[in-house]
Image (tube, helix red, strand yellow):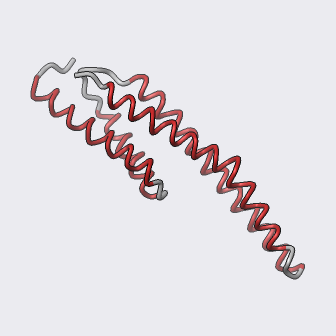
């Protein structure tokens, strides 16, 4: 049984994660920092000092999250390229499930749906491979 559909869905998920990661790093992070600094300019100096530190910390977390998602996108791309036909790879099942749960936790609905569909199709084909007895 070929894994073409799963490969394509995993590639789509990888591309989606890369796009959202790059948007998070290069669009959301600077926007958050700019808006935060603009709001702090309207406060007193003590609040400005504490607020600036908080904005810098949150911005670092946002960039770190974006980098984490980008690395995950690269890992998904590599997994999709190395997925074997006619074989059950249990580590891939675990990875797709874990990454799908992470997508749900981070409220990335589109990513969650992509990885959920990939997970279900992968499991269904695993069942078919087991029943056919053609596992390589």
x then y, percent, for residue 110: 44, 50
Residue in the picture at 9% in, 28% down: 131
Indicate the quadrant containing the C terminus: top left, top right, bottom left or bottom right: top left
Q: Classify residue 43 as left or right of residue 63.
A: right
The one of 129 and 16 positioned closer to us in this rendering: 16
Q: Classify residue 119 as left or right of residue 71.
A: left
Indicate the quadrant containing the N terminus: top left, top right, bottom left or bottom right: top left
Q: Can you say whether 84 is above or below 31 in the image?
A: above
Residue in the picture at 79% in, 61% down: 34
x then y, percent, for residue 126: 21, 32
Which picture quadrant has residue 22?
top right
Residue in the picture at 52% in, 42% down: 17
Which picture quadrant has residue 91?
top left
x then y, percent, for residue 36: 76, 67
Q: Classify residue 80 as left or right of residue 88.
A: right
Q: Classify residue 75 as left or right of residue 93.
A: right
Q: Can you say whether 54 is above or below 69 in the image?
A: below
x then y, percent, for residue 104: 42, 56
Q: Can you say whether 69 is above or below 50 in the image?
A: above
In the image as oriented, which residue stretches furthest toward the bottom? 44
Residue in the picture at 21% in, 32% down: 125
């Amino acid at each position: 049984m070929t894994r073409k559909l799963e490969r394509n869905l995993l590639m789509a998920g990888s591309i989606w994660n890369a796009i959202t990661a790059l948007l998070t790093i290069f669009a959301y992070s600077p926007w958050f920092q700019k808006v935060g600094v603009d709001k702090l300019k309207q406060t007193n100096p003590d609040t400005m000092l504490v607020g600036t530190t908080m904005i810098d910390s949150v911005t670092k977390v946002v960039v770190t999250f974006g980098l984490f998602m980008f690395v995950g996108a690269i890992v998904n791309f590599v997994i999709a390229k190395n997925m074997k036909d006619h074989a059950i790879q249990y580590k891939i099942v675990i990875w797709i499930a874990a990454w799908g749960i992470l997508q749900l936790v981070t409220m990335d609905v589109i990513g969650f749906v992509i990885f959920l569909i990939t997970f279900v199709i992968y499991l269904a084909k695993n069942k078919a491979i087991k029943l056919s007895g053609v596992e390589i």
